[in-house]
Image (cartoon, helix red, strand yellow):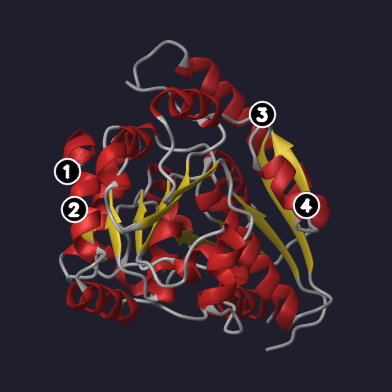
Amino acid sequence: MYMSELRVIISGGGTGGHIFPAVSIANALREINPDVEILFVGAEGRMEMQRVPAAGYKIIGLPVRGLLRPLWKPGNISVLMDFFKSKRMVKQTLREFKPQVAVGVGGYASSATLNAAYELGIPCLIQEQNSFAGLTNKTLAKKAKKICVAYEGMERFFPKDRILLTGNPVRQSLFNDSLKREDCAAAFGLSAAKPTILLIGGSLGARTLNESVMKNLSRIAASSVQFIWQTGSYYKKEIEQMLDVKGKPGNIVVTDFISRMDQAYCLADLVISRAGAGSISELCLLGKPSILVPSPNVAEDHQTHNAMALVNKHAALLVRDAEAPEKLIPLALETVVDTDKLQELGKNASAMALRDSARIIAEEVIKLAQQKKS
């Protein structure tokens, strides 16, 4: 599969859910083709402008922004002007860099980049993380030679003959077979013998998940279950102040950020999480039982669609955001001590996992480059 003089543009970002797959694809390309030249294109001021260089790749930023909702808002005139300006800028970059393939992972920048690439005759590949396709990828689908997806049934959004079911590339640092439960428990100051719930709301946190814990502190304190609670950086100070007043139960470890997610997942018997595509892919690959609380504040309610793909196969439980403060913690405390239920959820989640996603996508990128070269 090695190809000499391979050059690839990868574009997208805005959230970790777009950035992690993009970097994973780049890493897989580099593993197959150590001499590959990769250039990222992102949106100015978004997190990819820091995360991509930290991963060891060069990135350029475009002044591109997302459309305002509803679409008839007057401000969208300037959004469109920035889009066309970005498209002109990236066209110049494409002419100078001369990539054989352009890869889009969703997000504002990928629309301008892949539209420009298509007009210059550069083959395009898009990667859709969610079970409900985003607006950017839906509009790019007709211009893409290959569409890599993580869920079945995506022909309702994309041309069937171009779809490849690959799964979502995830952080490889999570897969550590050498970890022992006792060591992971000690790292968090917890017991290896007690049932453990990991509650994660993302790097910024999730207000509803945090409210659900605060409302049920006494119930948690009275249980034999221990919690690792990632509050997120945005809510850390507020929660610390509230716990100073109410008292923090001894069976909860509170942290705004978990640097060793591999240890947290290893110890967790049950995971409570939002239903972002990346999180779900990790849960399936690790075979972790979970309760999913889809965020209501996302485009096309795609997190609910992601969650239902698992729920319909008895691979996860679901609690609606509006019902979480009342129902989430009681359900979690009941589920984490039900070994048969945990086994069923974990087994079914693992059966849904699609492995080696990054390498499969990287191989498709190289195939497109070879076709262009020939």
Q: Which residue is mark 4?
A: 54
Judge left or right: residue 311 versus residue 176: left
Mark 2 to mark 1: distance in Å?
6 Å
**Which image quarter holds the C terminus?**
bottom right
Q: Which of the 4 image quadrants contains residue 23?
A: bottom right
Of mark 3 and mark 4, the one earlier in the sequence is: 4
Of mark 2 and mark 3, the one earlier in the sequence is: 3
Q: Is residue 353 visible?
A: yes
Residue 37 vertical position relative to residue 96 in the rendered view, above or below: below
Of mark 4 and mark 2, the one earlier in the sequence is: 4
Neighbourhood count class around disc 1 (C-alpha, 10 Å): few under 14, some 14–19, many 20 upward: some
Looking at the picture, tell me which residue is in the foreground, 314 or 240.
Answer: 240
Mark 3 to mark 1: distance in Å?
43 Å
Helix, strand or loop at disc 2?
helix
Of mark 4 and mark 1, the one earlier in the sequence is: 4
Mark 3 to mark 4: distance in Å?
21 Å
Callout 4 amino acid: Ala
Helix, strand or loop at disc 3?
loop
Mark 4 to mark 1: distance in Å?
40 Å
Judge left or right: residue 50 versus residue 322: right
Q: Are marks 2 and 1 in contact (CB under 8 Å)?
A: yes
Judge left or right: residue 221 versus residue 373: left
Residue in view at x 23 percent, y 35 percent: 325
Residue in view at x 19 percent, y 43 percent: 320
Q: Which residue is mark 1?
A: 327
Residue in view at x 72 percent, y 51 percent: 52
Residue 46 vertical position relative to residue 79 in the rendered view, above or below: below
Looking at the picture, tell me which residue is in the foreground, 229 or 104.
Answer: 229
Callout 3 amino acid: Pro
Q: Which residue is mark 2?
A: 331
